[in-house]
Structure formats: structure tokens, C-alpha cells
Image: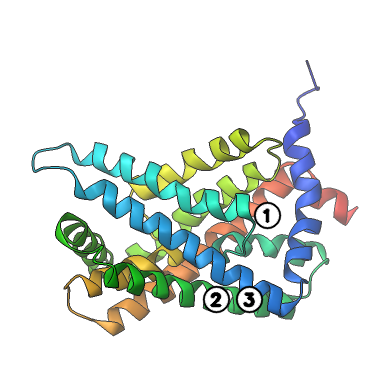
Amino acid sequence: MDHGGKDPVGDAIARSAPETLAAKAMQDWSRMAVLAVLAGAFIAFGSVISLVAQSGFADGQTPGAVRVLSGLAFSVGLILVMVAGAELFTGNTMMVLPEVTGALAVRRMIAAWCLVWLGNLASSVAVALLFAGAGGLEGGVGDAARSVAGDKLAKSAMAVFCSGVLANALVCLAVWMSMNANTLPAKILAIVGPITVFVAAGLEHSVANMSLIPMGWLSGIPDDWSAGVLNLALSTAGNIVGGSLLAVALAYGHDALKQDSA
């Protein structure tokens, strides 16, 4: 059916997104904290299965194939977040959209970001510690954890920041598309593609790094706390830029911002 060049599905998401994101920011603090802890754990489960996916490949296998498989596995984390309903910092960077439209105060947005980031961090580290305690980082999984974390900590500051921008543009694209999915299979399909791309490309997602870097430390790489803090700070900053720009660009492209300013 011809809609005169309009995208009714995209327009519907763009019109509802500011209100939806503002409501997330305005929920009760205790509820937000619990949901943030859940989201960090869910993403950490994605980190675990992505490392397991990398661990079973012998030398000589195509690295690209391993990365794609790892990305497919990691998408389980965001699927859990979106289907179960939890508060993920990287997705919440799109709260810039209701702030731009005037539906959300900037102080409330920043406070929500801080609470969710800390909740994500707490449960990410907890899952990493529990997985290590369960013996999960032995053998090939530990090798994968050391390799992944070592690569992340070896990147330059510019590389981490730029990688963070790209990573969260993809993550928020997955969130944005899944917001309008009416069935569970559709929601899962919307998530898998972008998440596979960002993981396979080795991009920097701050919440994923909250579990991947500790698992690298727990599996034997040096505990370089300064490098870990720098990675999280720069990937967080890049994630904010990537998610914010994507949300505003999509809303503007579908005329939601133009309508609000009219």
C-alpha cells in the first residue's frame, strides 16, 4: 500500500517514544533500581554465553565466523532486557529525546542515568564473580575472557570513545525497533541483527564491559583498575553520544520533533 512516502510504523514509534522514555525516567526510584540490577545481570548473561561461544573454536577457524556467532549469542542479553522488562543504561540514553521535547527535566534524566548505571554495574560484577566462583572461567572460556578483556583494555582512548558511539547507536536501534514489535518473534528479530553487528565488530558497550572486563581480571589478566575505569568512562560517554544522536535523528526524520515544535 502506498503511504505517499511516509512510514506509518516509524512515525508511530517516533511519536510515542518521547512519552514512553519520559515515563521510564519518572518511575519510582526503588522500582528503577531493582529493574537496573536485573538488566545488568541479563547483559552479563549475554556476556557469559558470548564467551562460551568463542571458547569452542580450535586454532585456524575463521575469526569473523567466531565473532558473528558470539554476537548472536550475546543478543540473548538484550532480548532478556526487552522481553522481561528492565532498565538498561545504554537504552536509556535515548531519554535525551523527551528532554529535547520538554517532557523531561534534564536533572531527572541525569539522576535516572546515574541510578541505572550503578545498578547495572553492581549486578554485572556480581554475575562475573558468581560465574568465576562456579568454575565457569576455566579452560577455553577463561581463554576467551582474557582475550576479550585484554583487547578492550589495550584500545586507545579515542578508539574506545568512537567505538562506544557506534555500539550504542546499534543497541538503541535494536531497542527502537523492538518498541513497536507486537509479537515476541518480531521483538527478538528486531534485536538480533544490530546486536550481532556491534559484538562481531568488537565495539564498546559500557554495560557489557561491566562484566567482560571483570571476567578477564578473574581469569588471570592483570587487575589494571585505572585502565578499566578509563574504558568504562569513555565507553559510557560514547554510548551517551551514540544513543542520544540516534534517538533525536530518528524522531526528527519522522517529524516527531517538528510536530512538537509547531
The residue that label 1 is drawn on is 248
Q: Position of residue 145 (x, y in %)?
A: 24, 62
Q: Indicate which disc residue 119 carries.
A: 2
Q: Residue 144 appears in which quarter of the rendering?
A: bottom left
* Crowd class of label 2 (few under 14; some 14 to 19; many from 20; radius 10 Å): many
The residue that label 3 is drawn on is 33
* Crowd class of label 3 (few under 14; some 14 to 19; many from 20; radius 10 Å): many
In the image, is 35 to the left or to the right of 144? right
In the image, is 52 to the left or to the right of 162? left
Q: Secondary structure at mark 3?
A: helix
Q: Residue 67 appears in which quarter of the rendering?
A: top left
In the image, is 224 to the left or to the right of 44? left
Of label 3 and label 1, which has the lower sequence position?
A: 3
User: Dots 3 and 2: beta carbons under 8 Å?
Assistant: yes
Q: Is residue 173 above or below residue 132?
A: above
In the image, is 234 to the left or to the right of 66? right
Q: State the residue in front, 234 or 185.
A: 185
